[in-house]
Image (spheres, rainbow, N blue to C red):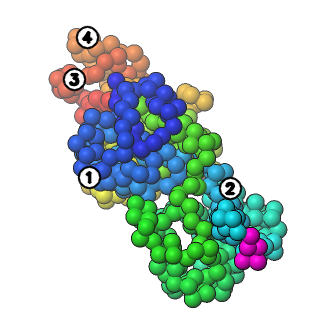
Amino acid sequence: MSKVLITDKINDLAVKVVARVAEVDNLPTMEEEELCKIIDQYDAILVRSQTKITSKIIEAGKNLKIIGRAGVGVDNIDVEAATQKGIIVVNSPDGNTHAAAEHTIAMMMAMSRNIPAADLSVKNGLWERSKFTGVEVYNKTLGIIGLGKIGSHVANVALALGMKVVVFDPYSNPEIVEKLGAKYIKHLDDFWGLCDYITIHTPKTKETTGLINVNTLNRMKKGVRIINCARGGIIDEKALFEAIENGQVAQCAIDVYEDEKNISNSPLLKLGKKAVLTPHLGASTDEAQVNVALDVANQVAEVLSGRNATSAINIPALKPQKLEAVKEYMDLAQNIAQIASQISGGAIKEVSIIVGGKLSSLDISPLEIAILKGVLSTNMVGINYVNAPVIAKQRGIDVKTSKTNDNENSIEVIINTSEKSYMVKGALLAKDIKRIIQINSYLTSIEPKKHMLLVPHINKPNMVAKVAGILGADNINISGMQVAQSFDYPDKSIMIINTDSEVQSETVEKIITIDGVDKAKYIGL
Protein backbone atom coordinates (compact mmCIF):
# COMPACT_ATOMS: atom_id res chain seq x y z
CA MET A 1 0.00 0.00 0.00
CA SER A 2 1.23 3.50 -0.81
CA LYS A 3 2.41 5.79 2.00
CA VAL A 4 1.67 9.51 2.21
CA LEU A 5 3.26 12.11 4.46
CA ILE A 6 1.23 15.18 5.41
CA THR A 7 3.12 18.04 7.04
CA ASP A 8 2.13 21.55 8.11
CA LYS A 9 -1.41 22.14 9.37
CA ILE A 10 -3.81 20.77 6.75
CA ASN A 11 -7.54 20.25 7.24
CA ASP A 12 -8.39 16.81 8.65
CA LEU A 13 -10.70 16.10 5.71
CA ALA A 14 -7.59 15.81 3.51
CA VAL A 15 -6.28 13.03 5.71
CA LYS A 16 -9.54 11.10 5.34
CA VAL A 17 -9.47 11.43 1.54
CA VAL A 18 -5.90 10.19 1.17
CA ALA A 19 -6.43 7.43 3.75
CA ARG A 20 -8.86 5.75 1.34
CA VAL A 21 -5.99 4.73 -0.92
CA ALA A 22 -2.86 4.98 1.22
CA GLU A 23 -1.36 4.78 4.68
CA VAL A 24 -1.05 8.33 6.04
CA ASP A 25 1.40 9.88 8.50
CA ASN A 26 0.33 13.36 9.63
CA LEU A 27 3.42 15.03 11.15
CA PRO A 28 4.37 18.59 12.14
CA THR A 29 6.42 20.88 9.90
CA MET A 30 10.01 19.63 9.54
CA GLU A 31 13.30 21.12 8.48
CA GLU A 32 15.24 19.79 5.49
CA GLU A 33 17.64 17.49 7.36
CA GLU A 34 14.87 15.87 9.40
CA LEU A 35 12.66 15.36 6.37
CA CYS A 36 15.50 13.88 4.31
CA LYS A 37 15.86 11.08 6.87
CA ILE A 38 12.31 9.78 6.39
CA ILE A 39 11.10 10.91 2.95
CA ASP A 40 12.28 7.73 1.19
CA GLN A 41 9.46 5.87 2.96
CA TYR A 42 6.75 7.84 1.15
CA ASP A 43 5.10 7.85 -2.27
CA ALA A 44 3.59 11.31 -1.78
CA ILE A 45 3.85 14.37 0.43
CA LEU A 46 1.28 17.11 1.11
CA VAL A 47 2.42 20.49 2.42
CA ARG A 48 1.26 24.05 2.84
CA SER A 49 3.67 26.99 2.75
CA GLN A 50 5.78 26.22 5.82
CA THR A 51 7.58 23.08 4.64
CA LYS A 52 10.26 23.69 2.00
CA ILE A 53 10.60 20.83 -0.47
CA THR A 54 14.19 21.32 -1.63
CA SER A 55 16.21 19.48 -4.27
CA LYS A 56 17.97 17.62 -1.47
CA ILE A 57 14.64 16.33 -0.12
CA ILE A 58 13.51 15.39 -3.64
CA GLU A 59 16.76 13.51 -4.23
CA ALA A 60 16.23 11.61 -0.97
CA GLY A 61 12.61 10.82 -1.87
CA LYS A 62 13.42 7.71 -3.89
CA ASN A 63 9.78 6.61 -4.01
CA LEU A 64 8.09 10.00 -4.42
CA LYS A 65 5.52 10.14 -7.19
CA ILE A 66 3.66 13.33 -6.32
CA ILE A 67 4.11 16.47 -4.21
CA GLY A 68 0.91 18.30 -3.25
CA ARG A 69 0.78 21.96 -2.19
CA ALA A 70 -2.46 22.90 -0.43
CA GLY A 71 -2.62 26.38 -1.91
CA VAL A 72 -1.78 28.28 -5.07
CA GLY A 73 1.90 29.23 -4.85
CA VAL A 74 4.60 26.57 -5.15
CA ASP A 75 7.67 28.72 -4.48
CA ASN A 76 8.41 26.50 -1.45
CA ILE A 77 8.87 23.54 -3.81
CA ASP A 78 11.82 23.00 -6.16
CA VAL A 79 9.61 22.28 -9.17
CA GLU A 80 12.55 21.92 -11.56
CA ALA A 81 14.19 19.25 -9.39
CA ALA A 82 10.87 17.42 -9.09
CA THR A 83 10.36 17.52 -12.85
CA GLN A 84 13.85 16.13 -13.46
CA LYS A 85 12.94 13.19 -11.22
CA GLY A 86 9.56 12.64 -12.87
CA ILE A 87 7.65 13.71 -9.75
CA ILE A 88 4.32 15.41 -10.32
CA VAL A 89 3.77 18.69 -8.46
CA VAL A 90 0.15 19.70 -7.91
CA ASN A 91 -1.47 22.70 -6.29
CA SER A 92 -4.96 24.06 -5.81
CA PRO A 93 -5.24 27.02 -8.17
CA ASP A 94 -8.94 27.63 -7.53
CA GLY A 95 -9.54 26.61 -3.92
CA ASN A 96 -8.66 29.96 -2.35
CA THR A 97 -9.45 32.27 -5.27
CA HIS A 98 -12.32 34.08 -3.58
CA ALA A 99 -10.58 34.20 -0.21
CA ALA A 100 -7.43 35.80 -1.65
CA ALA A 101 -9.37 38.23 -3.82
CA GLU A 102 -11.61 39.29 -0.93
CA HIS A 103 -8.58 39.79 1.31
CA THR A 104 -7.01 42.01 -1.34
CA ILE A 105 -10.10 44.21 -1.49
CA ALA A 106 -10.35 44.24 2.32
CA MET A 107 -6.70 45.31 2.61
CA MET A 108 -7.22 48.08 0.07
CA MET A 109 -10.25 49.42 1.91
CA ALA A 110 -8.67 49.06 5.36
CA MET A 111 -5.61 50.98 4.17
CA SER A 112 -7.65 53.69 2.43
CA ARG A 113 -9.84 54.34 5.50
CA ASN A 114 -7.14 53.75 8.17
CA ILE A 115 -9.35 51.13 9.78
CA PRO A 116 -6.73 49.19 11.81
CA ALA A 117 -5.27 52.34 13.41
CA ALA A 118 -8.71 53.82 14.04
CA ASP A 119 -9.88 50.57 15.62
CA LEU A 120 -6.90 50.53 17.96
CA SER A 121 -7.46 54.18 18.87
CA VAL A 122 -11.08 53.61 19.88
CA LYS A 123 -10.13 50.52 21.89
CA ASN A 124 -7.65 52.69 23.76
CA GLY A 125 -10.53 54.95 24.78
CA LEU A 126 -9.76 57.76 22.31
CA TRP A 127 -11.98 59.59 19.81
CA GLU A 128 -9.68 60.94 17.06
CA ARG A 129 -11.90 61.32 13.99
CA SER A 130 -9.79 63.95 12.25
CA LYS A 131 -6.63 61.90 12.69
CA PHE A 132 -7.99 59.05 10.56
CA THR A 133 -9.44 60.86 7.55
CA GLY A 134 -9.10 58.51 4.60
CA VAL A 135 -9.42 58.50 0.84
CA GLU A 136 -12.11 57.07 -1.45
CA VAL A 137 -11.39 54.36 -4.02
CA TYR A 138 -14.24 55.56 -6.26
CA ASN A 139 -12.98 56.83 -9.63
CA LYS A 140 -9.40 55.92 -8.72
CA THR A 141 -7.27 53.76 -11.04
CA LEU A 142 -6.34 50.30 -9.79
CA GLY A 143 -3.38 48.72 -11.54
CA ILE A 144 -3.41 44.92 -11.49
CA ILE A 145 -0.22 42.98 -12.21
CA GLY A 146 -1.27 39.46 -13.17
CA LEU A 147 -4.79 38.76 -14.38
CA GLY A 148 -5.23 35.16 -13.29
CA LYS A 149 -8.27 33.90 -11.42
CA ILE A 150 -7.57 36.01 -8.32
CA GLY A 151 -6.60 39.10 -10.31
CA SER A 152 -9.74 38.77 -12.44
CA HIS A 153 -11.97 38.56 -9.37
CA VAL A 154 -10.28 41.60 -7.86
CA ALA A 155 -10.85 43.46 -11.14
CA ASN A 156 -14.56 42.63 -11.14
CA VAL A 157 -15.03 43.84 -7.57
CA ALA A 158 -12.97 47.00 -8.18
CA LEU A 159 -15.03 47.85 -11.25
CA ALA A 160 -18.19 47.35 -9.20
CA LEU A 161 -16.79 49.85 -6.69
CA GLY A 162 -16.51 52.42 -9.46
CA MET A 163 -12.75 52.14 -9.93
CA LYS A 164 -10.92 52.26 -13.25
CA VAL A 165 -8.78 49.18 -13.83
CA VAL A 166 -5.60 48.83 -15.88
CA VAL A 167 -3.88 45.48 -16.32
CA PHE A 168 -0.35 44.37 -17.06
CA ASP A 169 -0.07 40.68 -17.81
CA PRO A 170 2.12 39.54 -20.74
CA TYR A 171 0.35 36.17 -20.75
CA SER A 172 -3.17 37.56 -20.91
CA ASN A 173 -5.22 38.15 -24.02
CA PRO A 174 -5.92 41.88 -24.55
CA GLU A 175 -9.42 41.05 -25.79
CA ILE A 176 -10.24 39.27 -22.52
CA VAL A 177 -9.01 42.27 -20.53
CA GLU A 178 -11.09 44.70 -22.59
CA LYS A 179 -14.15 42.45 -22.33
CA LEU A 180 -13.75 42.52 -18.56
CA GLY A 181 -14.04 46.30 -18.67
CA ALA A 182 -10.38 47.01 -17.93
CA LYS A 183 -7.59 48.53 -20.02
CA TYR A 184 -4.73 46.36 -21.24
CA ILE A 185 -1.23 47.84 -20.85
CA LYS A 186 1.28 46.14 -23.13
CA HIS A 187 4.50 47.48 -21.61
CA LEU A 188 5.26 47.62 -17.89
CA ASP A 189 7.07 50.94 -18.34
CA ASP A 190 3.74 52.45 -19.41
CA PHE A 191 1.90 50.91 -16.44
CA TRP A 192 3.46 52.47 -13.35
CA GLY A 193 2.47 56.09 -13.87
CA LEU A 194 -1.22 55.34 -14.48
CA CYS A 195 -2.09 53.87 -11.10
CA ASP A 196 -3.47 55.29 -7.85
CA TYR A 197 -3.41 51.77 -6.41
CA ILE A 198 -1.30 48.78 -7.48
CA THR A 199 -2.05 45.19 -6.52
CA ILE A 200 0.10 42.17 -7.35
CA HIS A 201 -1.27 38.76 -8.35
CA THR A 202 1.66 36.84 -9.81
CA PRO A 203 3.78 33.94 -8.57
CA LYS A 204 7.30 34.61 -7.34
CA THR A 205 9.65 33.81 -10.22
CA LYS A 206 13.02 35.02 -11.44
CA GLU A 207 11.17 37.65 -13.45
CA THR A 208 8.94 38.89 -10.61
CA THR A 209 11.38 38.77 -7.69
CA GLY A 210 12.09 42.37 -6.73
CA LEU A 211 9.68 43.61 -9.40
CA ILE A 212 8.78 46.57 -7.20
CA ASN A 213 12.12 48.19 -6.38
CA VAL A 214 13.76 51.61 -6.17
CA ASN A 215 13.58 52.14 -9.93
CA THR A 216 9.97 51.05 -10.43
CA LEU A 217 8.78 52.88 -7.31
CA ASN A 218 10.23 56.12 -8.66
CA ARG A 219 8.29 55.65 -11.93
CA MET A 220 4.97 55.43 -10.11
CA LYS A 221 2.50 58.25 -9.58
CA LYS A 222 3.35 60.18 -6.42
CA GLY A 223 1.03 59.12 -3.60
CA VAL A 224 0.35 55.63 -5.01
CA ARG A 225 -0.90 52.93 -2.64
CA ILE A 226 0.46 49.37 -2.97
CA ILE A 227 -1.14 46.06 -2.01
CA ASN A 228 0.60 42.66 -2.02
CA CYS A 229 -1.36 39.56 -1.06
CA ALA A 230 0.51 37.35 -3.54
CA ARG A 231 4.08 36.40 -2.64
CA GLY A 232 6.81 37.87 -0.46
CA GLY A 233 9.94 38.96 -2.29
CA ILE A 234 8.11 40.53 -5.22
CA ILE A 235 8.48 43.82 -3.37
CA ASP A 236 11.83 45.07 -2.09
CA GLU A 237 10.67 45.95 1.44
CA LYS A 238 13.56 48.33 2.17
CA ALA A 239 12.87 50.25 -1.03
CA LEU A 240 9.14 50.38 -0.24
CA PHE A 241 9.84 51.62 3.30
CA GLU A 242 12.02 54.43 1.97
CA ALA A 243 9.45 55.36 -0.71
CA ILE A 244 6.75 55.71 1.96
CA GLU A 245 9.06 57.67 4.23
CA ASN A 246 9.88 60.18 1.48
CA GLY A 247 6.26 60.48 0.34
CA GLN A 248 6.57 58.81 -3.08
CA VAL A 249 4.20 56.09 -1.85
CA ALA A 250 1.32 57.09 0.42
CA GLN A 251 0.55 53.72 2.04
CA CYS A 252 0.95 49.98 1.65
CA ALA A 253 -1.15 46.95 2.59
CA ILE A 254 1.01 43.83 2.83
CA ASP A 255 0.07 40.24 3.63
CA VAL A 256 3.28 38.47 2.51
CA TYR A 257 6.90 39.23 3.30
CA GLU A 258 10.48 38.62 2.21
CA ASP A 259 11.29 36.69 5.41
CA GLU A 260 8.16 35.59 7.22
CA LYS A 261 10.07 33.58 9.82
CA ASN A 262 11.87 36.74 10.91
CA ILE A 263 9.09 39.26 10.41
CA SER A 264 10.42 41.43 13.23
CA ASN A 265 13.30 42.40 10.92
CA SER A 266 10.99 43.93 8.29
CA PRO A 267 11.30 47.72 8.03
CA LEU A 268 7.60 47.90 7.23
CA LEU A 269 6.79 47.45 10.91
CA LYS A 270 8.05 50.97 11.53
CA LEU A 271 5.49 52.67 9.27
CA GLY A 272 2.58 52.98 11.71
CA LYS A 273 -0.78 53.74 10.08
CA LYS A 274 0.92 54.10 6.68
CA ALA A 275 1.12 50.30 6.53
CA VAL A 276 -1.62 47.73 7.04
CA LEU A 277 0.14 44.43 7.79
CA THR A 278 -1.42 40.99 8.17
CA PRO A 279 0.25 37.59 8.77
CA HIS A 280 -0.27 35.85 5.38
CA LEU A 281 -4.04 35.60 5.72
CA GLY A 282 -4.96 35.61 2.02
CA ALA A 283 -6.18 32.02 2.03
CA SER A 284 -7.15 31.92 5.70
CA THR A 285 -10.87 31.43 5.57
CA ASP A 286 -12.71 28.35 6.79
CA GLU A 287 -13.99 27.71 3.29
CA ALA A 288 -10.64 28.13 1.54
CA GLN A 289 -8.78 25.86 3.95
CA VAL A 290 -11.27 23.08 3.29
CA ASN A 291 -11.30 23.67 -0.46
CA VAL A 292 -7.54 23.60 -1.03
CA ALA A 293 -7.00 20.65 1.29
CA LEU A 294 -9.67 18.55 -0.42
CA ASP A 295 -8.55 19.58 -3.91
CA VAL A 296 -4.94 18.53 -3.39
CA ALA A 297 -5.83 15.43 -1.38
CA ASN A 298 -8.12 14.22 -4.16
CA GLN A 299 -5.38 14.75 -6.74
CA VAL A 300 -2.87 12.79 -4.66
CA ALA A 301 -5.38 9.98 -4.25
CA GLU A 302 -6.06 9.96 -8.01
CA VAL A 303 -2.38 9.76 -8.94
CA LEU A 304 -1.67 7.01 -6.41
CA SER A 305 -4.62 5.12 -7.91
CA GLY A 306 -3.08 5.32 -11.38
CA ARG A 307 -5.13 8.21 -12.72
CA ASN A 308 -4.29 11.80 -13.72
CA ALA A 309 -3.96 14.91 -11.57
CA THR A 310 -6.14 17.89 -12.51
CA SER A 311 -3.73 20.69 -11.56
CA ALA A 312 -0.22 19.39 -12.17
CA ILE A 313 1.83 22.54 -12.54
CA ASN A 314 4.82 20.83 -14.16
CA ILE A 315 2.82 19.11 -16.89
CA PRO A 316 0.70 22.01 -18.18
CA ALA A 317 -0.07 20.27 -21.47
CA LEU A 318 -2.12 17.73 -19.52
CA LYS A 319 -4.38 20.31 -17.91
CA PRO A 320 -8.01 19.10 -18.10
CA GLN A 321 -9.11 21.82 -20.52
CA LYS A 322 -6.38 20.81 -23.00
CA LEU A 323 -6.70 17.09 -22.43
CA GLU A 324 -10.47 16.88 -22.84
CA ALA A 325 -10.51 17.36 -26.63
CA VAL A 326 -7.84 14.73 -27.39
CA LYS A 327 -8.05 12.35 -24.44
CA GLU A 328 -9.38 9.43 -26.52
CA TYR A 329 -6.23 9.63 -28.67
CA MET A 330 -3.71 9.55 -25.80
CA ASP A 331 -3.27 5.76 -25.62
CA LEU A 332 -3.13 5.47 -29.40
CA ALA A 333 -0.46 8.18 -29.59
CA GLN A 334 1.68 6.43 -27.01
CA ASN A 335 1.20 3.02 -28.68
CA ILE A 336 2.24 4.40 -32.08
CA ALA A 337 5.35 5.95 -30.55
CA GLN A 338 6.25 2.75 -28.70
CA ILE A 339 6.05 0.73 -31.91
CA ALA A 340 8.05 3.29 -33.89
CA SER A 341 10.72 3.41 -31.21
CA GLN A 342 11.01 -0.37 -30.94
CA ILE A 343 11.42 -0.91 -34.68
CA SER A 344 13.99 1.87 -35.02
CA GLY A 345 17.75 1.52 -34.88
CA GLY A 346 20.45 4.08 -34.12
CA ALA A 347 20.46 7.21 -31.98
CA ILE A 348 17.23 9.21 -32.16
CA LYS A 349 17.77 12.65 -33.67
CA GLU A 350 14.24 13.83 -34.34
CA VAL A 351 10.62 12.91 -33.67
CA SER A 352 8.20 14.21 -36.27
CA ILE A 353 4.47 14.19 -35.50
CA ILE A 354 1.82 14.64 -38.19
CA VAL A 355 -1.90 14.72 -37.41
CA GLY A 356 -4.92 14.78 -39.67
CA GLY A 357 -8.70 15.01 -39.57
CA LYS A 358 -10.24 16.78 -36.60
CA LEU A 359 -6.91 16.65 -34.78
CA SER A 360 -5.54 19.22 -37.21
CA SER A 361 -7.82 21.84 -35.64
CA LEU A 362 -7.06 20.98 -32.01
CA ASP A 363 -4.31 21.72 -29.51
CA ILE A 364 -2.33 18.46 -29.64
CA SER A 365 0.27 19.30 -27.00
CA PRO A 366 -0.97 16.46 -24.74
CA LEU A 367 -0.44 14.02 -27.62
CA GLU A 368 3.11 15.31 -28.08
CA ILE A 369 3.88 14.43 -24.47
CA ALA A 370 2.27 10.98 -24.82
CA ILE A 371 4.37 10.36 -27.93
CA LEU A 372 7.61 11.43 -26.25
CA LYS A 373 6.78 9.17 -23.32
CA GLY A 374 6.24 6.28 -25.72
CA VAL A 375 9.43 6.95 -27.66
CA LEU A 376 11.70 7.27 -24.62
CA SER A 377 10.22 4.52 -22.45
CA THR A 378 11.47 1.88 -24.90
CA ASN A 379 15.06 2.31 -23.81
CA MET A 380 14.78 4.16 -20.49
CA VAL A 381 13.08 3.46 -17.16
CA GLY A 382 11.16 6.00 -15.11
CA ILE A 383 9.79 7.91 -18.10
CA ASN A 384 6.44 9.58 -17.51
CA TYR A 385 4.36 12.56 -18.63
CA VAL A 386 6.30 14.86 -16.32
CA ASN A 387 9.88 14.21 -17.38
CA ALA A 388 9.51 13.01 -20.98
CA PRO A 389 9.78 16.50 -22.58
CA VAL A 390 12.68 17.43 -20.29
CA ILE A 391 14.66 14.26 -21.05
CA ALA A 392 13.97 14.56 -24.79
CA LYS A 393 15.44 18.06 -24.71
CA GLN A 394 18.43 16.90 -22.67
CA ARG A 395 19.13 14.14 -25.21
CA GLY A 396 19.03 16.65 -28.06
CA ILE A 397 15.92 15.16 -29.67
CA ASP A 398 14.14 17.70 -31.86
CA VAL A 399 10.36 17.49 -31.88
CA LYS A 400 8.45 18.76 -34.88
CA THR A 401 4.69 18.86 -35.26
CA SER A 402 2.67 19.43 -38.42
CA LYS A 403 -0.92 19.05 -39.53
CA THR A 404 -2.50 17.84 -42.77
CA ASN A 405 -5.83 18.50 -44.44
CA ASP A 406 -6.62 14.77 -44.68
CA ASN A 407 -10.04 13.74 -43.45
CA GLU A 408 -8.59 10.74 -41.61
CA ASN A 409 -8.36 11.22 -37.83
CA SER A 410 -4.81 9.95 -37.79
CA ILE A 411 -1.51 10.34 -35.94
CA GLU A 412 1.75 9.68 -37.73
CA VAL A 413 5.06 9.39 -35.89
CA ILE A 414 8.34 9.48 -37.80
CA ILE A 415 11.55 8.79 -35.90
CA ASN A 416 14.69 9.99 -37.65
CA THR A 417 17.81 8.32 -36.28
CA SER A 418 21.51 8.26 -37.08
CA GLU A 419 20.73 5.30 -39.40
CA LYS A 420 17.41 5.98 -41.16
CA SER A 421 13.76 7.00 -40.71
CA TYR A 422 11.02 4.82 -39.26
CA MET A 423 7.31 5.55 -39.51
CA VAL A 424 4.17 4.30 -37.78
CA LYS A 425 0.69 5.69 -38.34
CA GLY A 426 -2.50 5.05 -36.40
CA ALA A 427 -6.10 6.15 -36.36
CA LEU A 428 -9.33 5.82 -34.42
CA LEU A 429 -11.94 4.16 -36.62
CA ALA A 430 -14.61 5.05 -34.11
CA LYS A 431 -14.45 6.74 -30.74
CA ASP A 432 -12.52 3.89 -29.10
CA ILE A 433 -11.39 1.54 -31.87
CA LYS A 434 -7.62 1.91 -32.21
CA ARG A 435 -5.86 0.73 -35.32
CA ILE A 436 -2.30 0.80 -36.62
CA ILE A 437 -2.81 1.67 -40.28
CA GLN A 438 0.75 1.92 -41.55
CA ILE A 439 4.21 0.69 -40.56
CA ASN A 440 6.89 2.11 -42.84
CA SER A 441 5.81 1.11 -46.36
CA TYR A 442 3.22 -1.43 -45.21
CA LEU A 443 -0.48 -0.46 -45.16
CA THR A 444 -2.10 -2.28 -42.27
CA SER A 445 -5.20 -2.36 -40.08
CA ILE A 446 -4.51 -4.08 -36.78
CA GLU A 447 -5.29 -3.32 -33.18
CA PRO A 448 -2.29 -2.37 -31.02
CA LYS A 449 -2.03 -4.99 -28.29
CA LYS A 450 0.28 -5.64 -25.35
CA HIS A 451 2.14 -8.37 -27.26
CA MET A 452 2.84 -7.96 -30.98
CA LEU A 453 5.19 -9.66 -33.38
CA LEU A 454 6.34 -8.07 -36.66
CA VAL A 455 7.69 -10.47 -39.27
CA PRO A 456 8.82 -8.88 -42.57
CA HIS A 457 9.24 -11.55 -45.24
CA ILE A 458 9.45 -12.34 -48.94
CA ASN A 459 6.15 -13.10 -50.70
CA LYS A 460 6.08 -16.85 -51.22
CA PRO A 461 3.91 -19.81 -50.16
CA ASN A 462 3.88 -21.34 -46.68
CA MET A 463 5.47 -18.39 -44.85
CA VAL A 464 2.54 -17.87 -42.48
CA ALA A 465 2.35 -21.58 -41.67
CA LYS A 466 6.06 -21.75 -40.80
CA VAL A 467 5.87 -18.79 -38.42
CA ALA A 468 2.64 -20.06 -36.84
CA GLY A 469 4.24 -23.48 -36.42
CA ILE A 470 7.15 -22.09 -34.41
CA LEU A 471 4.84 -20.01 -32.22
CA GLY A 472 2.59 -23.04 -31.62
CA ALA A 473 5.57 -25.24 -30.76
CA ASP A 474 6.65 -22.68 -28.16
CA ASN A 475 3.11 -22.59 -26.71
CA ILE A 476 2.40 -19.03 -27.88
CA ASN A 477 -1.21 -18.43 -28.95
CA ILE A 478 -2.04 -16.12 -31.85
CA SER A 479 -5.01 -13.87 -31.01
CA GLY A 480 -4.97 -11.75 -34.19
CA MET A 481 -3.04 -11.45 -37.40
CA GLN A 482 -2.73 -9.50 -40.63
CA VAL A 483 -0.43 -9.80 -43.65
CA ALA A 484 0.27 -6.55 -45.49
CA GLN A 485 2.17 -5.99 -48.72
CA SER A 486 4.73 -3.22 -49.14
CA PHE A 487 3.71 -0.51 -51.62
CA ASP A 488 7.39 0.20 -52.32
CA TYR A 489 8.50 -3.41 -52.78
CA PRO A 490 5.71 -5.67 -54.14
CA ASP A 491 7.71 -8.83 -53.44
CA LYS A 492 7.81 -8.04 -49.70
CA SER A 493 5.11 -8.35 -47.04
CA ILE A 494 4.87 -8.19 -43.26
CA MET A 495 3.02 -10.36 -40.77
CA ILE A 496 1.67 -8.37 -37.82
CA ILE A 497 0.69 -10.87 -35.16
CA ASN A 498 -1.06 -10.27 -31.85
CA THR A 499 -0.18 -12.90 -29.25
CA ASP A 500 -1.55 -13.73 -25.82
CA SER A 501 1.88 -13.70 -24.19
CA GLU A 502 5.37 -12.31 -24.62
CA VAL A 503 7.42 -13.77 -27.46
CA GLN A 504 10.81 -14.60 -25.99
CA SER A 505 14.03 -13.76 -27.87
CA GLU A 506 14.71 -17.49 -28.40
CA THR A 507 11.43 -17.82 -30.32
CA VAL A 508 12.17 -14.70 -32.37
CA GLU A 509 15.57 -16.15 -33.30
CA LYS A 510 13.92 -19.34 -34.55
CA ILE A 511 11.57 -17.29 -36.74
CA ILE A 512 14.46 -15.28 -38.19
CA THR A 513 16.08 -18.55 -39.37
CA ILE A 514 13.10 -19.22 -41.67
CA ASP A 515 14.22 -18.74 -45.26
CA GLY A 516 12.73 -15.45 -46.53
CA VAL A 517 12.15 -13.86 -43.10
CA ASP A 518 13.94 -10.57 -42.44
CA LYS A 519 14.50 -9.08 -38.96
CA ALA A 520 11.47 -10.33 -37.01
CA LYS A 521 10.75 -8.09 -34.04
CA TYR A 522 8.75 -8.56 -30.82
CA ILE A 523 6.92 -5.39 -29.72
CA GLY A 524 5.82 -5.00 -26.11
CA LEU A 525 3.29 -2.25 -25.32
Mark closer to the chain start, 1 or 2 = 1
Mark closer to the chain start, 2 or 3 = 2
Q: Amino acid at mark 2?
A: Glu
In the rendering, at what x and y percent does residue 393 appear? Answer: 35, 57
Mark closer to the chain start, 3 or 4 = 4
In the picture of the structure, the residue carrying the numbered disc 1 is: 56
Q: Nearer the viewer, mark 1 or mark 2?
A: 2
- Based on the picture, tell me whether residue 129 belongs to the magenta stretch: yes
In the picture of the structure, the residue carrying the numbered disc 3 is: 504
Lateral position of residue 183 relative to residue 42, left or right: right
- Part of the protein shown in magenta: 127-131
In the picture of the structure, the residue carrying the numbered disc 2 is: 102
What is the distance, in whole Å, between disc 1 and disc 4 at their CAs? Answer: 50 Å
Determine the image quadrant of residue 460: top left
Mark closer to the chain start, 1 or 4 = 1
In the picture of the structure, the residue carrying the numbered disc 4 is: 475
Mark closer to the chain start, 1 or 3 = 1
Q: Amino acid at mark 3?
A: Gln
Question: Compared with residue 303, is residue 174 higher up or lower down, i.e. above or below?
Answer: below
- Residue 383 visible in rendering: yes
Lateral position of residue 305 relative to residue 86, left or right: right
